[in-house]
Amino acid sequence: MSRTSISVCVWLVALWLAMPVPVAAYLDPGTGSMFLQGAIAVIAATLAAAGVYWRSARDFIRRITGKTSTSDSDRPGKS
């Protein structure tokens, strides 16, 4: 086979694969609820992770900028 005929065959196969095919798909009402619950879970997990690491990140930024806290009352266990 020549290079041109191979190229034509590849293009024909690519076009055939790119053609849309009708499918019978059904999304019940619970699917939207599942997506909403997933989005809420991602937001909650992000906020929880930020809460866990907030003090470490704040202290790191304070060390970089050279600012110190005016009081240690925000630290647990310190009096």
Image (cartoon, grey):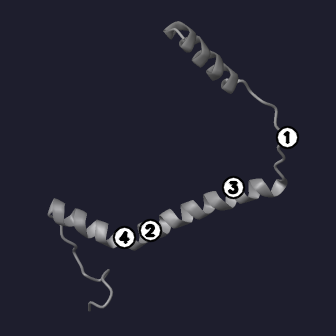
Identified by mark 2, the residue type is Ala
x and y percent of residue 32 in the render? 75, 53
Q: CA distance from mark 2 to mark 1?
A: 41 Å
Dots 2, 4 in contact, CB < 8 A: yes
Residue 49 disc label: 2
Identified by mark 4, the residue type is Tyr
Which comes sooner in the sequence, label 2 or label 3?
3
Q: Is residue 7 left or right of residue 69?
A: right
Which comes sooner in the sequence, label 3 or label 4?
3
Question: Which residue does the numbered mark 4 point to in the structure image?
Answer: 53
Q: CA distance from mark 2 to mark 4?
A: 6 Å
x and y percent of residue 48 in the render? 48, 70
The residue drawn where x is 80% and y is 58% is 30
Mark toward the viewer: 1 or 3: 1
Identify the secondary structure beneath mark 3.
Answer: helix
Mark toward the viewer: 2 or 1: 1
Q: CA distance from mark 1 to mark 3?
A: 21 Å
The residue drawn where x is 29% and y is 67% is 58
Which comes sooner in the sequence, label 4 or label 1?
1
The residue drawn where x is 49% and y is 63% is 46
Identified by mark 1, the residue type is Ala
Residue 24 disc label: 1
Residue 35 disc label: 3
Identify the secondary structure beneath mark 4.
Answer: helix
For residue 37, which quarter of the picture? bottom right
Residue 39 disc label: none
x and y percent of residue 44 in the render? 55, 66
Dots 4, 1 in contact, CB < 8 A: no
Which is nearer the eye, 65 or 60? 60
Tell me the quadrant of the picture where the N terminus can be found. Answer: top right
Q: Is residue 44 left or right of residue 58?
A: right
